[in-house]
């Protein structure tokens, strides 16, 4: 009889985190600290009051809480502290490599300079080496902002191209198809940047949006994207082209009681490179190890299946083949003795 996967096993499992919004790691303690330091009235004065505001039941109600919370992020040091606190938690979860999403438009639109955001985050990425965590940044466009805003953001970002490795697409998907940003993705690819996009959990036109992202825009990964199982042709396309799919069980649980676990298992069966991540851990109640454990426990995953998910995370990361081989060997060594 196979050994049951334990919480300790998933916590210590060597893994890559590829779907993590740095703004979504803003824990109540840090939110209060930064509000006080920057003299921002957030309407809450205790941890309990902050936690009480973290209530939502769909994407729109989540974003209505998520974006106002960012008001406390004002200075380079704030962004550094936000990222470095997450990276310390990542190290405790044996995250060996992480690619961190950040949303510059959410900050520049309220008067914070782009350089303030990226310089603070990048300093944390560099300092994470002391934690034995290999980290990189992915700049996301907000889907509910205009394509002109995305164009300007890319132009503003390119002088800092040495500080991030790719672009992504996130925020409110409704009436905001990926194709709206095809030109910006094409321009980013021409600059040598990697491409990924959120595509979409149970949204209107999910399959059409997935098709746009894969077949027209040429993304290398799909974030969420588990609705792809509704179209076998796209599933086969993803498997053949080794497209990575990033799934986040605990945040998925807010839109689907089954956490999209059945879809993850189906993708594994179809040899699609699906992997597990934490999305916005401060808001959805668990870090990456907790997400692995949640799906393993709910669906009685074998150790081999959990290790395969972790292996997929390294294989679809944007690092060299040599680094991938080192991390995968570390993973296999861990699995062999645990």
Image (cartoon, rainbow, N blue to C red):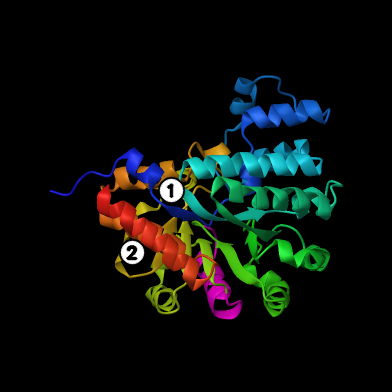
Q: Residue at x 59, y 27 (%)?
A: 51
Residue 240, numbered circle:
none
Image-quadrant location for residue 46? top right
Image coordinates for residue 225, horizontal then vertical, percent:
49, 62
Q: Residue pushed farthest left?
A: 1
Q: Which residues are magenta?
A: 203-218
* Residue indicated by mark 2: 268
Above or below, comparing residue 233 to residue 265 in the picture: below
Q: Residue at x 63, y 63 (%)?
A: 168
Tag 1 secondary structure:
helix
Between 165 and 323, the one lying in front of the other is 323
Q: Is residue 63 visible?
A: no
Choose the circle earlier in sequence order: 2 or 1: 1
Q: Residue at x 39, y 77 (%)?
A: 236
Image coordinates for residue 268, horizontal then vertical, percent:
33, 64
Above or below, comparing residue 204 to residue 293 in the picture: below
Q: Residues within 10 Å of mark 2 (few under 14, many from 20)?
A: some
* Residue indicated by mark 1: 249
| Horizontal side, residue 183 vs residue 204: left or right | right
């Amino acid at each position: 009889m196979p050994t049951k996967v334990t919480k300790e096993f998933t916590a210590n499992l060597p893994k890559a985190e590829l779907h993590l919004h740095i703004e979504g790691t803003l824990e109540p303690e840090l939110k209060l600290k930064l509000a006080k330091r920057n003299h921002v009235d957030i309407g809450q004065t205790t941890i309990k009051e902050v936690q009480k505001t973290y209530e939502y039941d769909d994407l729109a109600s989540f974003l209505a809480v998520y974006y106002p919370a960012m008001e406390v992020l004002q200075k380079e040091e704030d962004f550094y502290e936000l990222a470095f606190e997450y990276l310390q938690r990542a190290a405790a979860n044996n995250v060996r490599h992480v690619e961190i999403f950040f949303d510059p438009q959410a900050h520049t639109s309220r008067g914070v300079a782009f350089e303030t955001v990226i310089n603070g985050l990048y300093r944390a990425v560099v300092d994470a080496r002391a934690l034995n965590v290999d980290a990189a940044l992915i700049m996301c466009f907000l889907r509910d902002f205009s394509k002109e805003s995305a164009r300007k953001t890319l132009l503003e970002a390119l002088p800092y191209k040495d500080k991030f490795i790719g672009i992504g697409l996130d925020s409110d998907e409704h009436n905001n198809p990926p194709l709206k940003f095809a030109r910006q993705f094409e321009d980013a690819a021409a600059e040598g940047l990697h491409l990924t996009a959120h595509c979409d959990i149970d949204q209107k036109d999910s399959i059409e949006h997935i098709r746009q992202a894969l077949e027209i825009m040429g993304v290398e990964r799909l974030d969420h994207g588990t609705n792809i199982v509704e179209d076998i042709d796209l599933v086969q396309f993803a498997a053949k082209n080794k497209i990575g799919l990033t799934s986040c069980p605990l945040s998925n649980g807010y839109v689907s009681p089954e956490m999209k676990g059945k879809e993850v298992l189906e993708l594994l069966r179809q040899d699609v490179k699906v992997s597990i991540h934490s999305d916005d851990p401060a808001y959805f109640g668990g870090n990456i190890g907790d997400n692995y454990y949640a799906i393993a426990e709910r669906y009685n995953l074998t150790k081999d299946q959990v290790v395969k998910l972790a292996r997929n995370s390294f294989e679809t990361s944007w690092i060299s083949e040599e680094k991938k081989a080192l991390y995968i060997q570390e993973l296999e060594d861990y699995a062999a003795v645990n």
